[in-house]
Image (tube, helix red, strand yellow):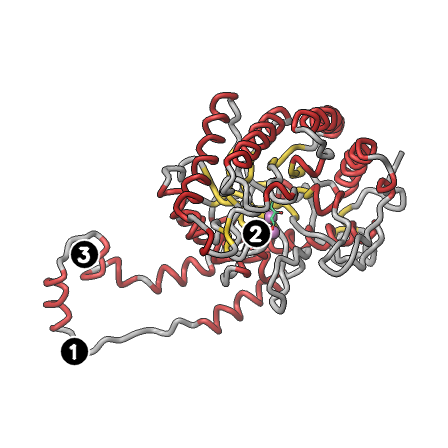
Amino acid sequence: MAFFSKVEKIKFEGKDSKNLLSFRHYNPEEVIMGKKMKDHLKFAMSYWHTLTAGGNDPFGDATLIREWDNLLPMEKAKARVKAGFEFMEKLGLEYFCFHDKDIAPEADTLEEYFKNLDEIVDLIESEMKRTGIKLLWGTSNMFSNPRFLHGAGTSCNADVFAWAAAQVKNALDITKRLDGQGYVFWGGREGYETLLNTDMKLELDNLARLLTLATEYADEIGFEGQFYIEPKPKEPTKHQYDFDVATVMNFLRTYNLDKKFKMNIEANHATLAGHTFQHELRLARINGMFGSIDANKGDLLLGWDTDQFPTDVYDATLAMYETLMAGGFTTGGLNFDAKVRRASTDTLDLFYAYIGGMDTFAKGLKVAAKLIEDKVFENFIEKRYESYTRGVGKDIVEGKVTLKELAEYALTLKDVKNDSGRQEMLENILNNYIY
Ligand code: XLS
Ligand code: NI
Ligand code: NI
């Protein structure tokens, strides 16, 4: 049975195509910088936004009523698997990501919940075999259930910590079984609302304990996927401990976890933290922490995670520039952590949304590759910092001068000359590459 019978397999038709159900830029087999586009981009479907999201918001109930919604919980879960794989096949998505809770209903006991999960994982496994579609990363939802109202790893309640540990253990088992390339920790409620009731030190220590236990268990079962932290500054809590890349790096280094984790960077989280998407990617890249991407966009006029599909070619170009400069994805990929608006009620809208996101990043990839091939920014930057390749600059970089020697040198300078940073010229060049 098909859930999306209105839509055929989406094909690449080139940029002049008038068919809105086709790709204009995403040509999976096209080779860019020695690698197929699909292997550069590694697009993934987010299970939650695509198959379980109902369009609820604080003022209104679900509007996105799908064909599977009137089924009983386990039947619904199975229908979603079928629908998800049909959807991925039609779009040519080769990866997906999910939380435990997305795929199977919770139950009265943890034991029953895990049984439900196992039954659905069997089905997912057989669909993966049938289609060749792979798991980019798995994760555990430790924020939706009321149990986690004080947090999971950072809860003041040790029983909740244990419950979270059980969910992580189970999600790791599932991720390993499905040969997932990674495992994400997004600290949904790992943060605080007020410091008046919070032992910040214990909460941070405990969060690190949970992560450490997870890595130890991974070693025990031989899970070789990459662990990621997904930074986010706020929402749902007022302050999330995984604020941004810089904060997370400091946390990981403090607790000796920095060799075990990389970053999963989400565009909308970057802007919520007051950074550009490129800033977060750059910081991760230069610190050897670049891992994976949650591709979406926010609305700069709204102060929350709107999780919209990415359509901004400028941002996508700079994101792909950072990705290529980082050496490309290894275990990571581009997961569309994005949802259609609640008024986009038709399943066709899901296709338009993904096509838009995929074309945006495909175009971004092509432009970024060209920029790198022509060394547009590299040459400029090299020249801009030339003073550190000779004379006093070289001595500074090589650690060969003292503060006193620098002061003596500076006293001999009569006139310091600076060159233009040429920002506008560089912006024009970037635009010329995009046009
Ligand atoms: C929420 C996060 C979440 C993670 C996975 O803001 O983006 O969806 O990606 O738990
Ligand atoms: Ni995300
Ligand atoms: Ni998010």
Dot 2 crowding, Cα within 10 Å, few <14, some 14–19, many 20+: many
- Pointer 3 and pointer 1: residues touching (CB < 8 Å)? no
Residue 414: give its label: 1
Q: Position of residue 184 (x, y in %)?
A: 55, 39
Q: Residue under circle 3?
A: 395
| Camera-side residue of 322 and 281 | 281
**Left/right of residue 356 with respect to residue 137 in the rendered view:** right
For discs 1 and 2, the disc positioned in front in the rendered view: 2
Tag 3–tag 2 contact (CB < 8 Å): no
Residue at 50 percent of width and 55 percent of height: 239
Label 1 secondary element:
loop
Q: Nearer the viewer, residue 347 or 103?
A: 103
Residue at the image point whose x is 80% and y is 35% from the top: 73
Whether residue 370 is visible, yes or no, is no
Q: Residue at x 52, y 46 (%)?
A: 190
**If you read the primary sequence from the N terminus, does the residue marked by circle 3 or circle 2 appear first?**
2
* Secondary structure category for the residue under label 2: strand
Residue 404 screen position, x and y as percent:
10, 63
Q: Nearer the viewer, residue 147 or 50?
A: 147
Please tell me whether mark 3 or mark 2 is closer to you in this view. Answer: 2
Measured in 3D between alpha carbons, the distance from the residue under mark 3 to the one under mark 2, in whole angstroms, is: 39 Å
Could you tell me the amino acid type at mark 1?
Lys
Spatial CA span between label 3 and label 1: 20 Å
Q: Is residue 8 above or below residue 342?
A: above
Q: Seen in the image, is 111 located left or right of residue 151?
A: right
Please give the residue where the numbered disc 2 appears in the rendered image: 266
